Image (cartoon, rainbow, N blue to C red):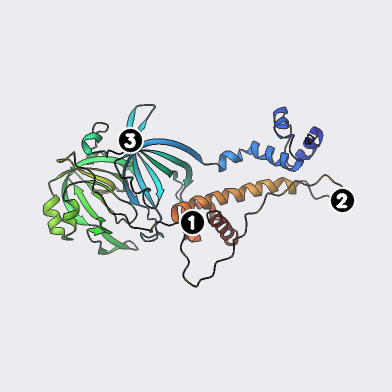
Amino acid sequence: MDRKLLDRKQLEEEGKKYGIDNITDEEYERNCRFTLKTALTRILNERKGTAGQLKKDRKVVKGYLMGGRDFVYRAITLDESKSQFVAVLMEDPEIGEYGFVEHTIWGHLKPDSIKHGMGVEMETEESTSTNEEGREFHNKNIRKITVQKTEQLTLKKLLEHLTPRDPNEISEDDLYEMVIVRGEISNVEPVPVFDEGQIIDEHPLLVNDKPCIRLGLKTEGDVKVSVQFDPARLAEPMLCFPDFVEILKENDIESAINSFVGRSVVGIGSVRRFQVGEPCFVTVNLNALFSEDEPETAPHNFPREEKVDDKKPKAKKGSKKSPAPPKAPAPPAPPSTTKVEKPEPPKEEPKSDPQTFNKVEGWKSEVREALELLGSEADIASIRELKPSLKDVKDPLLEALIKAVKSETQ
């Protein structure tokens, strides 16, 4: 039996209670087969552009994987991290030039057959967030990787597409951007361990069997540029430098100095520090490092740990399964047209209900993105730090939203 079409006059009269005036023929045609409540909600959200605000932009793109760095963010330690940044060499189809774009991925590269340097096709999900300083970040998350070319890229092939920059050319405008830099190693140091801004120790030269070292590059004037491998667990750098790992296994800084100073290298990474002063200190956190003297060297094969990137923490033996979290609140329905004995509520009240629902859905989307980056064990403080828009959301509501998002992935 066909459903009776919604009465146009009734839709317009009820729409005025929600601030919906001048319903067009197109809006009526799209929604007349629904109930009054559904039609009003759809028209209101269509006019507000709610779907565009909440929907993430998904794309399928191609490129070359060029090394990873673990995601570590203030309250998120290396052992707690669930994701990594991966540098991807991509061609801009509009100008025909190549560049590096940083993407985020959960855990290790999967499947294990995927190696850095390979040509891949990726399904990505893009979103935008703003930090507490008001800086806007464009997040690109990799959902799926498919290998297109198994032959791994070498420095020789890479230099056919890109020209590395001189260390002196890095400026403050490059902060948080990906760069490719060529230079001569002039100094070698361990990576310091900080506690509340103070150096308290030094990392070993290998952490989890991966390089952890700072290499100073030769520069002119009052600019000090270093490229460094930070401690890594999930991520693997793209390392095309013979004997590099073997030398670091000695954990002897003097041996490393004697082995590396004077060598010409090409590094790919993100500029994470640009400290203006005399001298000016610049630090590039490396995704990849190449020996310029041996440009056809294949990438080092790093072993991958097992079962360190599970999203869901495993319950301890004997622990009880926690009850299911409450579901997110459903959108309030427009008032019924049926006459009742109770007095009619003020018209301003129903107008705000869909807006409240949209706010809650927006907060929920922010929570979902934060948990994707920080991991399911992230606390409220860490989530608010990453998503300043949640700062004024009350703790009980934010806790309910966190539980609701977690329940969606269980």
Q: Is residue 156 left or right of residue 127?
A: left
Q: Nearer the viewer, residue 395 or 10?
A: 10
Expressed as whole percent of the image width and height from the top left, the position of residue 92 reads: 37, 31
Residue drawn 33% across the image and 46% down it = 113
**Image mark for residue 383:** 1
> Marks 1 and 3, Cα distance to the nearest angstrom?
31 Å
- Residue 65 can be seen, yes or no: yes
Where residue 17 sits in the image (x, y, percent)? 76, 42
Residue furthest to the right in view is 341
Real-space Cα distance between discs 1 and 2? 45 Å
Q: Which residue is mark 3?
A: 99
Q: From where the camera sits, is residue 278 visible?
A: no
Q: Which amino acid, by three-letter code, is at mark 2?
A: Val
The residue at the point 18 percent across, 51 percent down is 244
Give left or right: position of 331 versus 161. right
Q: Which element type, helix, strand or loop, lies under badge 1?
A: helix
Q: Residue at x 71, y 35 (%)?
A: 31
**How many residues crowd mark 3 within 10 Å: few (<14), some (14–19), many (20+)?**
some
Seen in the picture, residue 247 relative to 42 is either above or below; the reply is below
Q: Amino acid at mark 1?
A: Ile
Residue 142's image quarter? top left
Question: Considering only order in the chain, which callout, 3 or 1, is on the residue closer to the N terminus?
Answer: 3
